[in-house]
Image: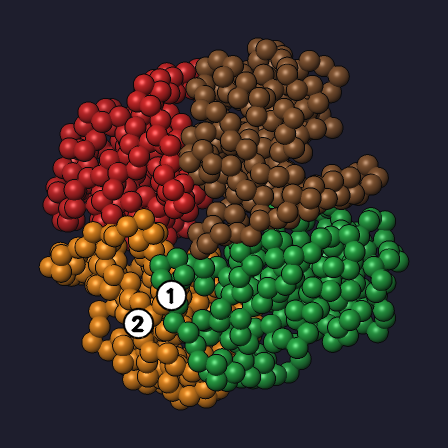
Chain colours: A brown, B green, C orange, D red
Amino acid sequence: MNPRKIVAELHAELVRYGLVVWTAGNVSGRVPGEDLFVIKPSGVSYDELTPENMVVCDLDGNLVEGEHAPSSDTAAHAYVYRNMPEVGGVVHTHSTYASAWAARGEAIPCVLTAMADEFGGEIPVGPFALIGDDSIGQGIVETLKGHRSKAVLMQNHGVFTIGKDAKAAVKAAVMCEDVARTVHVARQLGDPLPIAQDDIDRLYDRYQNVYGQRSPR
Amino acid sequence: MNPRKIVAELHAELVRYGLVVWTAGNVSGRVPGEDLFVIKPSGVSYDELTPENMVVCDLDGNLVEGEHAPSSDTAAHAYVYRNMPEVGGVVHTHSTYASAWAARGEAIPCVLTAMADEFGGEIPVGPFALIGDDSIGQGIVETLKGHRSKAVLMQNHGVFTIGKDAKAAVKAAVMCEDVARTVHVARQLGDPLPIAQDDIDRLYDRYQNVYGQRSPR
Amino acid sequence: MNPRKIVAELHAELVRYGLVVWTAGNVSGRVPGEDLFVIKPSGVSYDELTPENMVVCDLDGNLVEGEHAPSSDTAAHAYVYRNMPEVGGVVHTHSTYASAWAARGEAIPCVLTAMADEFGGEIPVGPFALIGDDSIGQGIVETLKGHRSKAVLMQNHGVFTIGKDAKAAVKAAVMCEDVARTVHVARQLGDPLPIAQDDIDRLYDRYQNVYGQRSPR
Amino acid sequence: MNPRKIVAELHAELVRYGLVVWTAGNVSGRVPGEDLFVIKPSGVSYDELTPENMVVCDLDGNLVEGEHAPSSDTAAHAYVYRNMPEVGGVVHTHSTYASAWAARGEAIPCVLTAMADEFGGEIPVGPFALIGDDSIGQGIVETLKGHRSKAVLMQNHGVFTIGKDAKAAVKAAVMCEDVARTVHVARQLGDPLPIAQDDIDRLYDRYQNVYGQRSPR
């Protein structure tokens, strides 16, 4: 499928799961076989997103195709694609519960089996970083390189997630907010029970290798 | 009605009441008169569920009909059907508030008349159990056998509910999250008032025997 | 408009504002000029409600018209109509935040101008009462007679609201949950500031007499 | 576009983001080039709003065009337009989280980069003021004059937001509730980390001057 179409349509999942308001948040996806990625245009509402108004950037974040300015978070996406060749999709949101953990600069502890499945442990916190240069991208990459988690809570800011493609990154964003909310709610009335590290390891291994349909769909 | 159609359509109730995100959660229903049950395929999104892509398994959880792999929770459903012949439907979700109680390993106390009606007392906690063998199924059955509650909070995991058919199990899942949320909210600002055991008994007895339309609908 | 149609359609507002799940909750409305009221049938889902399947009862709660059994809360509605001739509509829900206050047996303090407008002060708590006789109806009437509030939190149960007609009672149910939630959220992080009694009085007087469109619509 | 149409349609955003229930809340927008503004009629439901039933008032809040009574908050809107010539739109809601901060009379601290972007610092609290004269309008103007924030939490009441046009004021209302909720959630489990003042200044400056599409759209 057309990468512009895939990326445009995946934004609807951010809306469906309540991860974004107004024009905040964005999805990008690598163009297969090229040093390019598709990303949301800046400041355009979710209702107006179409394959046609998506923009295409090179891995330095320069606009290559498109009539709109790229998302103001483009530099962070570009930095991730340049430095993590295995990443095919990036998502950024200010989803409520994940951003609340980020505002306290606190990692989300792994106390749910679904979290062990998807993230393989805690969801870590990245540094406070200002928009405008590579600081945010660097913070994402330094935190996620060598970490099982595909989500990072950027301090006082929001969440970035990565995946093998744009859909996997969107899934990580959806699951991140879901576990951020459940663990928050659990913590409101006491301490969640820990899960032993080797149980986390077994769950993560199984989910990454066994879950879902084996045949390509 | 066709059991595949019933089970496929009931998944929409999990979405409607916000009990699931992405592909998590599943409904199954016994095929009347046969040692088989219909269940959700693994890793397929809720938008794509149809009677045709539901899968049919035997009571050992082996795939009997269907082109997709069955839900990764199939073994737990199968164990329940094998060991609780009165059960005609099983539902599994990671709904937020119920899973939060499960993360603390804490039963939901019966402090609402609607909870006495539907569950006849507290909603109990089942053991921590890993996916991959019969541990989850055993935990569900050991907790719910001889208990009025049709819902069990599996520690650090989520909820399983049972019912005389798939619709009743879905209702229990919806009501479980509703009371889990209300009791959570009540507890945030103090202690809910207890309901006397004999009042719980009277409410449970009445609701199980009097509520709803008498004639088949 | 046909009273069955009015009552059937108003149930959609309970769904829209998230006040009900599954078949819980009900709206009733007096039939103008007759000792009768229209109410929801018992155990029928919100999607299936039509003017035709609404049922009509007399003021003792006996079924007068309709093919379904009336709501299991019919006796409470009937008691209110018998004892409060000024009431033309009654609504019952287990909406989350209002029911949480009810579970603690705690009145909602009047700390919002919107609450002063609609309820004229705190929303009071009624007694714990079992379904099956006039206990619930008596608790509602004893609490609301001579009280400005059109909503009562029945202990460990849920909310009943009244109004000059069914629409006004539905509005009270919507506003009750809205203020129950806002005051709950305010209290989670400290003490809301009180509003002086004479300011509450002025707001209530103005809203009851000035707000909205003067001409009938 | 027709100012009545713009204002009528923007009300749908208040509904979409859950900022209003029943008939509460309102949007107004200045008529370009005239001493007039368009505002919601009083007590009319959101489903029934059309360009035709919007009303037009002069800057003293007198009805100039329209068959309905103007919103009961018209005097506050008019006062803002009279005293802040740079303002082209005003929005009022009782959105849950913002109103909860308002009920405690507590400003929302700037602990999120999105908040620095949009509001340039904390969201301040305005005085308790009764409806019926210019008190509310004065409280809004005194609080927001010379403040970066385009939102004010009126004590025990709700939120007023301003913007260069009605759409910008609606955006501020949406963002205000979003950050009110996230900061609330963050505070429930501890203290959010502060953002240094000069970082707030840089973020605010960049967002006001760089974000979005440069060309008119």
Q: Nearer the viewer, residue C119 or B43?
A: B43
Q: Residue at x 76, y 48 (%)?
A: B42
Q: Nearer the viewer, residue D57 or D13?
A: D13
Q: Residue at x 29, y 63 (%)?
A: C108
Q: Nearer the viewer, mark 2 or mark 1?
A: 1
Task: Find numbered disc 2 in the image and state the secondary structure of the residue it sits on.
Answer: strand
Residue annotated with mark 2: C125
Residue B152, x across and y down, in percent = 62, 65
Same subunit under labels 2 and 1? no
Disc 2 and disc 1: Cα gap in Å?
A: 16 Å
Q: Residues within 10 Å of mark 1 (few under 14, many from 20)?
A: few
- Seen in the image, is B36 located left or right of residue D62? right
Q: Which corner quadrant holds the C terminus of chain A?
A: top right
Using the rendered view, name the quadrant where residue D16 is placed. top left
- Seen in the image, is A87 located left or right of residue C14? right
Disc number placed over residue B191 in the picture, else none: 1
